[in-house]
Amino acid sequence: MKIAIGSDHVGFELKQTIKAYLEELGHEVTDFGPFEASRTDYPIYGEKVAKEVASGAYPAGILICGTGVGISISANKVAGIRAVVCSEPYSAKLSKEHNNTNILAFGSRVVGEDLAKMIVSAWLDAEFEGGRHAKRVEMIRSIENE
Ligand code: RB5
């Protein structure tokens, strides 16, 4: 799968680790930065990755900041984005199955490398179930038009 990835400075090291992990799994990963760990601002990268996903260029995005909160809030400001911030695999899986999330976020100050990999795998392996959930996801989309 083509995956867009981004972080802020706090999430930079974990981004490098997760990028390598995704490549090991056979995914095609594009890194939207940052490319060094100096201080920066999470909305820059949340917006970049979100716009790539919203455009359809990438079916999935992964974002990492200190908590995953700021960068997911930023991504969710872009129309068509359903970004979830997760610190365990169960919510990651259900967020895909029920909410059809297209961006996964987590925090490098919250989860370690192994847990982050489990969260990523749970999210990527899950599939949207459609059915009754499709109507609700459509209701979310309609809020964007209000
Ligand atoms: C940066 O200090 C920190 O605020 C950021 O990484 C993130 O946790 C924000 O939600």
Image: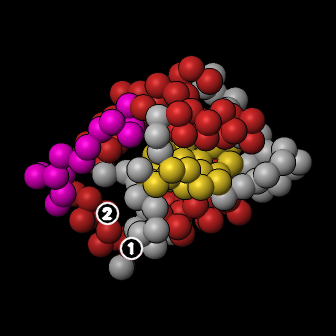
The single residue placed furthest to the bottom in the displayed view is 145
Disc 1 target residue? 144
Mark 2 touching mark 1, by CB under 8 A? yes
Q: Determine the image quadrant of residue 142.
A: bottom left
User: The C terminus appears in which quarter of the rendering?
Assistant: bottom left
Position of 89 relative to 143 (above/below): above
Q: Is residue 81 above or below residue 96?
A: below
**Residue sitting at the far right:** 38
Say what secondary structure mark 1 lies in. Answer: helix
The residue lying at 58 percent from left, 61 percent from top is 49
Read off the residue under disc 2.
140
Between residue 65 and residue 32, name the one nearer to us: 32
Q: Is residue 87 visible?
A: no
Determine the residue located farthest toward the left in the rendered image. Answer: 131
Closest to the observer: 13 or 41? 13
Query: Is residue 123 inside the magenta stretch?
Result: yes
| Mark 1 residue type | Glu
In the rendered structure, the answer to whether residue 143 lies left or right of residue 7 reads: left
Residue 38 shows up from this direction: yes
Q: Is residue 124 above or below residue 133?
A: above
**Neighbour tally class for label 2: few under 14, some 14-19, many 20 plus, Cα within 10 Å:** some
Residue 121 position in % (x across, y down): 42, 32
